[in-house]
Amino acid sequence: MDNTDVVIVSAVRTPFGRFDGVLKEIPSIDLGVMVVKEALRRIQLDPSEVDELYYGTCIPAEYAPYLNVPARQITLLAGFPADSVSMTLDRACCSSMTALRLGFRAIRSGEASVAIACGAENMGNTCHLVEAGNGRWGKRLGHIQMVDILFELGYGKKGFNPVALDAGEVALEFKIDRAEQDNWGLRSQERWATAYEEGKFKVGEEIMAIQIPQRKGDPIVFDRDEPPRKTTLEKLGKLRTIYGSPTVTAGNAPGMNAGGSAIVIMSRKKADKLGLQPLATVETMAWDAAEPKYMATLPAKSINKALSNTQKCIEDLDLIEINEAFAAVTLVSLKALAEMDAEKYSALQEITNINGGAIAIGHPVGASGARVTMTLMYELMRRGGGCGAAAICGGLGQGESIILQV
């Protein structure tokens, strides 16, 4: 241990909601305020102690009605002093892990001693758009066409493939067929159900409870993930593929979800000064990119890059979390990490997403990078310690990873 270590001292997320679930009318900015306030409350940290806040979100059409600079809005709404500094960033699904890496860099460089990395998304709350050619510069008389920005997440407008298409095709290149992806989707649901019954996703650790006001009656207390569902391989096998993908379906992919997550990091020296017990040490972080088609390989590429920063190898990891943007992503990256060795591939599956992943939990894109990080951390804590890696891919061939020691 070293005073220059970067440590996690608080980490929390909301339960994740379905596309059309109880969170559907709550702006992502409000979800961001909730998790930031709760992360600070848990350690009784005054907002004035926070040097920098980074906020990841990647569907501007959702927060558009609340204008811009959502990170700045969140800090002010959460009670931070007016001289607090913050930044909103969009690196697709990597965004909140990228936020964590920027805070990690700031602390490592000595420019900050305390930082918050957070992210939120409410995909079901996304606006339909009227483009300028149809609206502001458009028709004087007649109907106006609206655009659903969630369809293919807009990638097709500039000629890029839907990410589900790329992921499915690359999975087949790696000899991972539809049946294997459906099996992983079922595994995710079953592992989450077991973990929930064992009390692993409970309020006070990874999860916070939130109250959702109702037009009539008492508010709803929302304290567990909404997306998980019971299914069977037979049901999964009957689902149609989506967006022209050869393998990806709604059953081996997550939904379009809502939720927020936040992590407080600081130097070990600062944690000691404040009397805070570190939950984990951030050993290193790494990011990477490749051809957009090969997005599914980016968690593996970024984990390998992070491992090389620490002179560790894949066998040194006790646990792995890889965000299930699709089952194809997790399986392709595991096969890449195994260097296509069947025995090693099987062994890596046994330590990956052991409590289920985004297919069950949900994938509110801006919040997911921080979510996989804290899911990994809390499981390592339950086991009494160890070393683990978390990684996530992002649209158009991006990746991010972190190595934690507990």
Image (cartoon, rainbow, N blue to C red):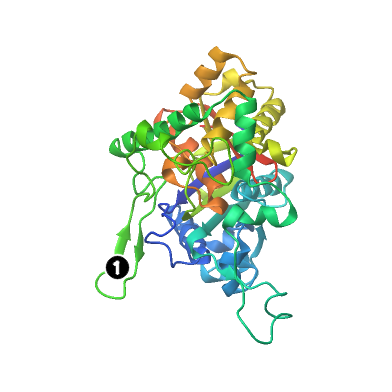
Task: Say which residue appears at 70% left-offset and 41% top-offset.
Answer: 397
How far from the left and from the top, in percent, is residue 192? 37, 37
Q: Is residue 90 visible?
A: no
Q: Is residue 295 visible?
A: yes
Nearest the eye: 133 or 75: 133
Q: Residue furthest bottom?
A: 140
Task: Say which residue appears at 51% left-offset and 63% top-offset.
Answer: 28
Say what amino acid the circle numbered 1 marks. Pro
Q: Which quadrant of the structure image shows residue 41? A: bottom left
Which residue is labeled 1 in the image? 219
How far from the left and from the top, in percent, is residue 55? 61, 57
How far from the left and from the top, in percent, is residue 290? 74, 37
Nearest the eye: 97 or 329: 329
What secondary structure is found at the residue carrying circle 1? loop
- Quadrant for the N terminus, please: top right
How far from the left and from the top, in percent, is residue 152? 60, 53
Q: Residue furthest left?
A: 217
* Label total for image: 1
Nearest the eye: 377 or 70: 70
Within 10 Å of disc 1 (Cα), the crowding (few <14, some 14-19, many 20+) is: few
Task: Say which residue appears at 61% left-offset and 28% top-offset.
Answer: 172
Residue 326 vertical placement versus 307 (above, below) = below
Q: Is residue 237 left or right of 321 when viewed as pictured?
A: left
Nearest the eye: 266 or 54: 54
Task: Say which residue appears at 60% left-offset and 29% top-offset.
Answer: 332
